[in-house]
Image (cartoon, helix red, strand yellow):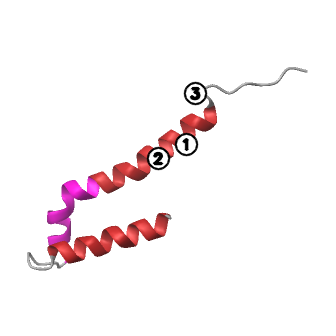
Amino acid sequence: MTEKKFGILSLPVIVAALGYFVDIYDLLLFTIVKKSSMLGVGATDATLLSESTRVINWRTRQSG
């Protein structure tokens, strides 16, 4: 019987890498559109930092 060897480009590694990419991409995307999106939902310039930090922390707890 021969053992099946998995290389670096095996299906589980590719799927895991794509999942990691998508997870990081949405956090990166939020930092790009943060100011306009937070102001659009009612944050002010004075509360922008604290409100956007709250959103990032909420999102991180949900995925972890």
For label 2, the residue is 20
What's the distance in space between the residues labelled 3 and 2, CA to CA?
16 Å
**Picture quarter with the N terminus:** top right
What's the distance in space between the residues labelled 1 and 2, CA to CA?
6 Å
Instruction: Tell me what residue is drawn at x 29 percent, y 52 percent.
Output: 28
Q: Earlier in the sequence, mark 3 or mark 1?
A: 3
SS for callout 1: helix
Mark 1: which amino acid?
Ala
Q: Are marks 3 and 2 in contact (CB under 8 Å)?
A: no
The residue segment tinted magenta is 29-41
Q: Earlier in the sequence, mark 3 or mark 2?
A: 3
What's the distance in space between the residues labelled 3 and 1, CA to CA?
11 Å
Residue 22, horizontal then vertical, whole percent: 42, 48
| Predominant secondary structure, magenta span | helix
Which labelled disc corresponds to residue 61?
A: none
Q: Is residue 27 above or below residue 5?
A: below
**Residue 46 part of the magenta segment:** no
For label 3, the residue is 8
